[in-house]
Amino acid sequence: QVRLVESGGGLVQAGASMRLSCVISGRSLTMLSVAWFRQAPGKEREFVGGTTRDSATPYYGESLNGRFTISRDNAINTVYVQTSSLRPEDTAVYYCAARRTWNIATTPAQFEYWGQGTQVTVSS
């Protein structure tokens, strides 16, 4: 059973930096494509970015204008998302998701495994 556990969220002030972690167990990270999504109250789940199983090169949601960076450490089965200069509109629950297939995916329905999410609240 694949399990994903996010951490690193909390209450931060606008302008602060953030790094969230997603620790994966039950399957090697080298066998998974992993992505980050976020969901603000009353809004649909939004793709932030991800990495495919076969490539360390990440890809990102177009609406985020390159503000987020995805990275992965296969040695410790962990994927990260980080950004600097947080804004109040970045307030959301951030989710880590994984799938066994290798190709790029950007919609929630394409992912098989999900973490419980971590809340990020950005105060102005």
Image: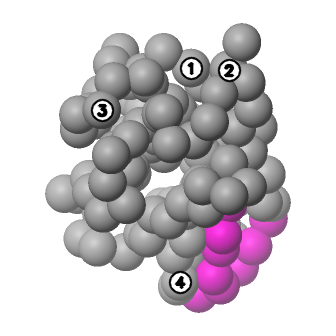
Q: Is residue 86 above or below residue 57?
A: below
Residue 123 appears at what percent x and percent y? 68, 71
- Residue 14 among those drawn in magenta: yes
Residue 85 appears at what percent x and percent y? 52, 85
Q: Is residue 78 above or below residue 109?
A: below
* Among numbered discs 4 and 3, the one appearing first in the sequence: 4
- Crowdedness near tag 1: few (<14), some (14–19) or many (≥20) residues, C-alpha within 10 Å: some
Query: Is label 2 in contact with label 3 (beta carbons under 8 Å)?
Result: no
Give amino acid for label 2. Val
Residue 59, label in figure: none
How many discs appear?
4
Q: Which residue is mark 3?
A: 102
Q: Nearer the viewer, mark 1 or mark 2?
A: 2
* Among numbered discs 2 and 3, the one appearing first in the sequence: 2
Q: Nearer the viewer, mark 1 or mark 4?
A: 1
Give amino acid for label 4. Ser
Residue 84, label in figure: 4
Query: Is label 4 in contact with label 3 (beta carbons under 8 Å)?
Result: no
Q: Which residue is mark 2?
A: 2
Cα separation, mark 4 vs mark 3, equals 29 Å
Q: Nearer the viewer, mark 4 or mark 2?
A: 2
Q: Which residues are magenta?
A: 11-20
Report the front residue among 38 and 28.
Answer: 28
Q: What residue is drawn where x is 42% and y is 69%?
A: 68
Q: Secondary structure at mark 4?
A: loop
Query: Is label 1 in contact with label 2 (beta carbons under 8 Å)?
Result: yes
